[in-house]
Image (tube, helix red, strand yellow):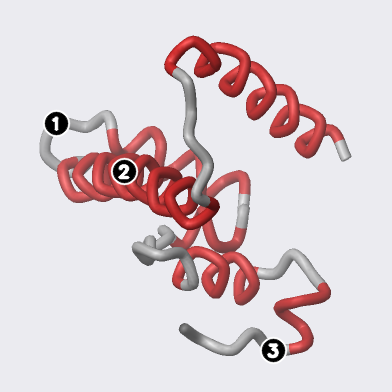
């Protein structure tokens, strides 16, 4: 795993986002827009991904990222040793969604 610089630890920088994504159990390669959080670049990547020809690479990358996120969640849960009851999944999803929404408002 890559060592985080003091700047990466203390700030939401592209370097911090890249380091965080690469330090997951299954590393994820971010697009430039995801790393910089540049709104125009994110919009360009999103719009381009819908193009049948030009967007193929982006669509494949987004699909791979999504799959890796699911596998990372599973790995992190496994590391805790916690067991999840299938009946609790709705509440867990709600709690995670609420936490993410709160985080976005900060």
Q: Residues under labels 3 and 2: Cα distance? A: 27 Å
Q: Horizontal placement of 75 versus 98: left or right?
A: left
- Report which residue position mark 1 lands on: 52
Residue drawn at x 77%, y 83% is: 7
Q: Horizontal placement of 92 versus 76: left or right?
A: right
Residue drawn at x 84%, y 33% is: 105
Asked whether 59 or 28 is in front, the reply is 28
Precedes in sequence: disc 1 or disc 2: 1
Residue 96, image x, y percentages: 64, 29
Indicate which disc residue 5 carries.
3
Q: Residues within 10 Å of mark 2 (few under 14, many from 20)?
A: some
- Seen as rendered, the residue at the extreme left is 53
Residue 100, image x, y percentages: 70, 33
Indicate which disc residue 62 carries.
2
Mark 1, secondary structure of its residue = loop
Q: Residues within 10 Å of mark 1 (few under 14, many from 20)?
A: few
Q: Horizontal placement of 19 versus 86: left or right?
A: right
Q: Residues under labels 1 and 2: Cα distance? A: 15 Å
Identify whether 21 is placed above or below 51. Answer: below
Identify whether 4 is placed above or below 99. Answer: below
Specify the quadrant that holds the C terminus.
Answer: top right
Residue 102, image x, y percentages: 81, 30
């Amino acid at each position: 795993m890559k060592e985080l610089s003091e700047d990466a630890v203390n700030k939401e920088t592209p370097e911090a986002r890249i380091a965080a994504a690469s330090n997951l159990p299954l590393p994820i390669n971010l697009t430039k827009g995801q790393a910089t959080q540049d709104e125009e670049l994110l919009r360009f990547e999103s719009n381009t991904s819908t193009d049948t020809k030009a967007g193929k690479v982006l669509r494949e990358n987004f699909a791979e990222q999504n799959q890796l996120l699911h596998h990372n969640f599973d790995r992190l849960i496994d590391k805790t040793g916690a067991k999840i009851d299938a009946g609790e999944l709705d509440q867990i999803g709600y709690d995670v969604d609420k936490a993410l929404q709160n985080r976005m408002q900060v």
